[in-house]
Image (cartoon, grey):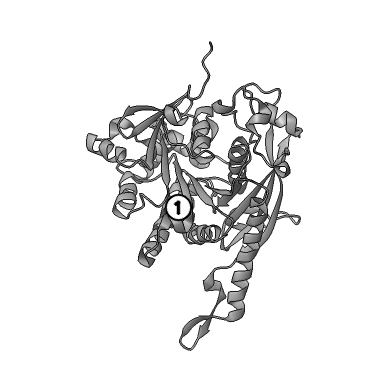
Amino acid sequence: MKPGVRYLLLILLSTTGCHRYLVATPNMLLDQDARQAFANCAKDSQGSDVPVLYATDRADDGESKDRPTYGYKRSTSLAFGVAQVRLNPHPSWDELIEASTRSKRAREFELRLADTKELGRIVPLMENAEIAPKGTDITRAMAERIVAHRSEFHELLQNRLAQTSQKDVYIFVHGFNNSFEDAVFRAAEVWHFMGRVGVPIAYTWPAGLGGIRGYAYDRESGEFTVTHLRRFLKMVADCPEVERVHIIAHSRGTDIAISALRELNLSCRAAGVSTQQRLKLENLILAAPDVDEEVFMQRFVGEHLLRVAKRTTIYASEHDRAIELSDLVFASRRRLGVLASKDFSPKMKQALAKLPNVQFIECKLSGLSTTHNYVFTHPAALSDMILVLRDRRDPGAANGRPLRQPAEGVWELTDDYFVRKSP
């Protein structure tokens, strides 16, 4: 059996049940004054527990009588609520922020899901429809129930926005073979190291069947969830208190996010309105995108997705083994997540240079043969993503985001990004 095939089987047969620990401190936070680094964190958010809003179309598998337990099966409705991530051992706030600004911690912190509270459920129109003489019909009572559920979500979001000076919402869309817990943990970690500003939301779709059929199941679940994500993005943007929305999509989640934005963009263009303004979309991050290069070009260039967000940032690495294996499965021309500057023609590089709102980041980082989550776990990559999301900085040392630019239209990220040099 070829090594690549063996590696593929290991991924397909692996489970997500191993222990998770708080990721390494981002380079940009190393040796900073802890209180200064978290100075913008609201008083109500200063604790070792990390509350994360969630939206999910996973079905509750009923394994617990005390709280919902969302598995890999699908639900035709979209639940929302709050998940509490707890660190073990349980540090004080001072201990936690001190550990969060050091490369060597006195102890490591395991992430645990302490509680999950479902606070509402958005039922799709098709489940509220009744057969009428002239076709399907939505009764007034049903329509009012839909509005009430959306109002409940807006109230939840408004309460969280009231606790932070930064009225931004960060929506995380995970990838293949991730559990509900995986998605919530990822959102919690990034939000914590951002200084706990704005509101994090884990959008978690029905993935994680595992086994040989797992990738195919997750791929179809990704197609299933597009409608729910499209409606959810509109619902978030409809909240008056929200000033900016940021979408952070990973792996297969990038295809889901792009598909939902494509449908929204078609609708907005037909109505003659700006998609970016309608969705309040500041940043679209495509982290290790598991998307065919030609499909990406069709949608972003041919279908005018280039300006759906104020800024689109693509993180890719030619050493991402998981994306290479996706190439093996689908026999695609090339996946976007493994492209490097050498793969671009001069014409393509010139085109990227003329699109300052689209930034291609080539990640030349260590350890990529063992992880597909490098954008969220590598101290250099996580530093750059924080600068994009929290500070909305353009690339370049002059903008406080010291990426190298080896070629026109392409930026380069290496291990020493934001590492302070010894005098």
Front-most of 370 and 102?
A: 102
Residue at 56 percent across and 54 percent down: it is 242
Front-most of 365 and 64?
A: 365
At label 1, counting other C-alpha atoms closer than 10 Å, the crowd grade (few under 14, some 14-19, many 20 or more) is many
Q: Is residue 291 visible?
A: yes
Front-most of 372 and 138?
A: 138
Q: Is residue 269 left or right of residue 223?
A: left
Residue at 50 percent across and 28 percent down: it is 380
Q: Position of residue 166 (x, y in %)?
A: 59, 45
Which residue in the rendered view is the most extreme toward the bottom? 133
- Label 1 element class: helix
Quarter of the image that includes the N terminus: top left
Q: Is residue 406 left or right of residue 147?
A: left
Q: Position of residue 155 (x, y in %)?
A: 66, 60
- Kindly identify the amino acid type of the residue bearing the numbered disc 1: Ile
Residue at 45 percent across and 52 percent down: it is 256
Check the image and report above or below for 32 versus 266.
above
Residue at 38 percent across and 46 percent down: it is 291
Check the image and report above or below for 31 versus 373.
above
Which residue in the rendered view is the most extreme toward the top? 423
Q: Position of residue 38 (x, y in %)?
A: 65, 34
- Count of marks, rendered view: 1
Q: Which residue is label 1 attached to?
A: 256
Kindly indicate the quadrant of the structure image that contains residue 107: top right
Q: Position of residue 338 (x, y in %)?
A: 37, 36
Kindly indicate the quadrant of the structure image that contains residue 197: top right
Q: Is residue 61 visible?
A: no
Kindly indicate the quadrant of the structure image that contains residue 58: bottom right
Check the image and report above or below for 133 versus 68.
below
